[in-house]
Amino acid sequence: MAVSLEHEDPCRKSYHIWVKDHDMPDSDFIPDYLKPFIANQDSSLYTPIDHASWRFILRVSKDFFSTRAHEKYLNGLKETGVSTERIPLVSEMDAKLKRFGWRAVAVNGFIPPAVFMEFQSLGILPIACEMRTLEHLAYTPAPDIVHEAAGHAPIIADPEYSAYLRAYGEISRKAIFSYQDMAIYEAVRNLSVAKEDPRSTEAEIECAQKGLDEAAGAVSFYSEATLMARMNWWTVEYGLVGSVDDPRIYGAGLLSSLGESYHCLGKKVQRRPLTLDCIQSGYDITKPQTELFVTPDFAHLTTVLHEFAKTMAYQIGGATGLARAKEARTVCSVALDSGIQISGVLAEYGENGGYVNTLRFSGPCQLSLGDQELKDQGPEHHPEGFSTILGPLKKFGTSPSDLTDEDLKSLTHGEWTTLHFESGITVHGKKKSVKRAAGKIILLSFTECKATAGSGEVLFDPAWGTFDLACGSEIESVFGGSADRKNYLLKTGGFHQLPMKPKCNLTEENRELNSLYASVREIREELGKNSELDANQAKSLSRIEADLRKNHRDDWLLRLEMIELLSAEPHLSGQLPPDFEDHLRKDLRVIQSVSTTHSEMIERGLALLDPKKETAI
């Protein structure tokens, strides 16, 4: 439908474009702690130039990727609600994706990697609603609706690829993020936003680039999340499928990049079979990739993923897992062999005879069982940290988790209970409560408790309140984030993200040009209904062509759209000045001569109108 919006707001001038305000799918399926990241897709912010840019990208993409992308691409566009004529509505895509067991939600630009993976693990595709500018038509480092809708969505319709995405999301949410990862994320986000924002100055872009260089230079180790991001980059974003000699494109980064996808299958880009070694290869989002990885099929992606998962702390556990968590300095969870899970920032851990005997966490902490927070054991009860003691008791040779009620009685004298650990640590206090699960003691709580190391060091003082002893002997798993995400995040303020305002590509400088685009679009739509160009429409096209020559000499896309009109309806030429198309084509050649980037886009656009003409890759 065409809706005319009459507003003074420059982003809402009266254009005849597809508009549906406040487009937002139902959010009942979204966990509360993720809802702050959900945006309202205000499609009235899309300008006529935005819609023309989208249309050009989809037309060129469908033509090029029909022979160079995975076979699911073209049908996948239809199946996921992505059309050529206009920027899609997220609510429509959500309705289509439901059939594949997925959902879609609108978000504003960059969201933290942990949040993105959280969405993906739940089978939800986050779609950045912003539209790239015409200046960055071939590629933009910032997330936009071209990348998400026309890049990610189509291949999701393939069952094996969809299964890989879900598995990747589930495993990646267990990956340990580091404080350095978050610094890199913020720097990349700032640079991408600065480059895409037409209001940014050169100084602002330079400052953002410097920030990224400094953050990258400070990286001292590669976290599990970094390695998983590399796997994601070389598969989901920049992956090829088939044989190394004759692959097809499926990565969203390539499917949404008219520039890089056009050259990625050429001789200048090295292609390697996809193995776990891909995680050793870094990447730069601001430059074309010089190597790409080829998977024989989508099932192989899941095989490589599980191969990597075997090296992660959530499967290894032990002191190795603890070392990764401590180095990360971010919220992680430690699961003991009794089943209890401790979430917080791991500050220290002690070892005795090769076994871990103490754990100390800082900041808000949470105790959980089966990823569910235990009653009265959340961040509000442990706001400043948590410590516990592991290992066997001297008297029994087993952990407190294996004690029976009779065993506990034998350790109690009057009101007081004393535990002597083989590591030399002693716990002495009044037993308050015992919590069991699956036949094991997972938590012993004491009042007036004192815990002392063999050296005499005080590990817990009675003045600190109740001592909750999380029982266990071995570290079975260590994973990133809290065990009960919902409760931990709600109680600690949730994931943190700097707010972003919805972006509008309409400026005072391009207002008049947008009006010209809107007029051509309206004429094309009317011709689609009756195929007859009336005198007023012919005058409008002549006026637009003259206006472009006088005031918008460097705009190429609208000239291309008008040539397309004549190509689709050759009989229209008789109603226009005889040199009308010649002027358009000559102007395009002038623009090509001064702009390498525009030159390639113009050549590919003209090739669509002349199928016999091939452009070289």
Image (cartoon, rainbow, N blue to C red):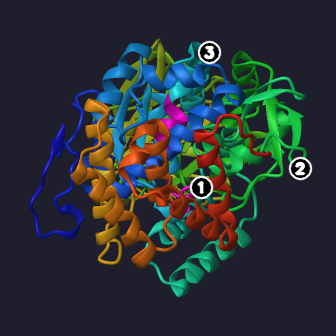
Q: Quadrant of residue 296?
A: top right
Which mark lies nearer to you, 2 or 3?
Answer: 2
Quadrant of the drawing holding the N terminus? top left
Magenta-drawn stretch contains 137: yes
Give the label on residue 617, or none.
none
Is residue 365 rendered to the left or right of residue 218?
left
Callout 3 amino acid: Glu
Instruction: Label 2: state its secondary structure.
Output: loop
Name which residue lies at 34% across and 32% down: 374
The percent coordinates of residue 108 (x first, y second) are: 36, 53
Instruction: Label 1: state its secondary structure.
Output: loop
Name which residue lies at 26% across and 47% down: 522
Image vertical order of residue 387 relative to residue 206, above or below: above
The percent coordinates of residue 39 (x first, y second) are: 28, 48
Instruction: Label 3: state its secondary structure.
Output: helix
Q: Provide the residue span drawn in magenta.
A: 136-153
Callout 2 amino acid: Lys
Q: Which residue is mark 1?
A: 139
Quadrant of the drawing holding the C terminus? top right
Name which residue lies at 21% across and 69% down: 10
Q: Earlier in the sequence, mark 2 or mark 1?
A: 1
Q: Earlier in the sequence, mark 1 or mark 3?
A: 1
The percent coordinates of residue 208 (x first, y second) are: 56, 77
The percent coordinates of residue 467 (x first, y second) are: 40, 46
Is residue 325 rendered to the left or right of residue 362?
right
Q: Which residue is mark 2?
A: 268
Callout 1 amino acid: Tyr
Image vertical order of residue 287 relative to residue 55, above or below: below
Give the label on residue 160, or none.
3
Q: CA distance from mark 1 to mark 3?
A: 28 Å
Magenta-drawn stretch contains 204: no
For the view shown, which residue lies furthest in the left direction?
A: 6
